[in-house]
Image (spheres, grey):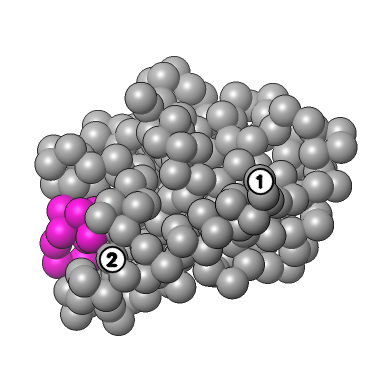
Amino acid sequence: MNALSTILADRALSVVRAPHISDPVALADALSRGGIRALELTFTTPGVLALVRTASNAGAVVGAGTVLTADQARSAIDAGASFVVTPGLRPDVAAIVTDAGIPLMMGALTPSEVMTALDLGADAVKIFPARTVGPAYFKDLLGPFPDAQLVPSGGVNAGNAAQFLASGAVAVTAGTDVVSPASVAAAQWDDITARAQAFVAAISADTKEGSS
């Protein structure tokens, strides 16, 4: 099972933006215990490559996010990243990641950008900022792009995640609602696990209601 399969199975991945992460393995374990196995560590975090390497060596499903350049993509893959996420369209990054054969999640917002991301080989398209467009926008995008695997990012929380999934998103991102910078800095792993469980429970409850 590759990283994208894990994300699709859980219908969620966690995006961590923090000024300091003391123990990426404990963080990944805390999230996994809560039901979110895939973890995205971003290049906005100092020393992210060492963090990715440590988590990857421990067997975590860890990817690199906010990847802006081909050099960043290469270094992330060399560090063991099992998927790569960009905030926008980056053809040079797409070439590196697709050649490496790992999943690429490319950022987009407009229909033209979604189309370009798919043309560049994105396995999934991150719609950012999702809070700006709302869940209904995903249903609209799936009209011209019925096979696109869309993932909302930015402003997604336990209160609205199910709405994005019901509108056609294949997975959602769990950000500061689950992993706040303060809780990461304080190594509050049990709290992060509880927040991840609440996030996953909100998704699961919607699934049960929709199938009843």
Q: Residues within 10 Å of mark 2 (few under 14, many from 20)?
A: many
> Up-down: is 124 above or below 204?
above
Type of amino acid at the residue the image marks with label 1: Ser
Residue found at x 15% / y 59%: 26
Residue 21 appears in the figure: yes
Residue found at x 51% / y 45%: 11
Residue 193 percent coordinates (x, y)? 28, 65
Residue found at x 37% / y 75%: 180
Q: Which quadrant of the figure has residue 6?
A: top left
* SS under mark 2: helix
Left or right position of 150 against 37: right
Left or right position of 29 against 121: left
Residue 60 percent coordinates (x, y)? 23, 42
- Depth order, front residue of 177/205: 205
Type of amino acid at the residue the image marks with label 2: Thr
> Which residue matches tag 2?
193
The span picked out in magenta is 20-30
- Which mark's residue is nearer the viewer, 2 or 1? 1
Precedes in sequence: disc 2 or disc 1: 2
> Which residue matches tag 1?
211
> Up-down: is 160 above or below 35?
below
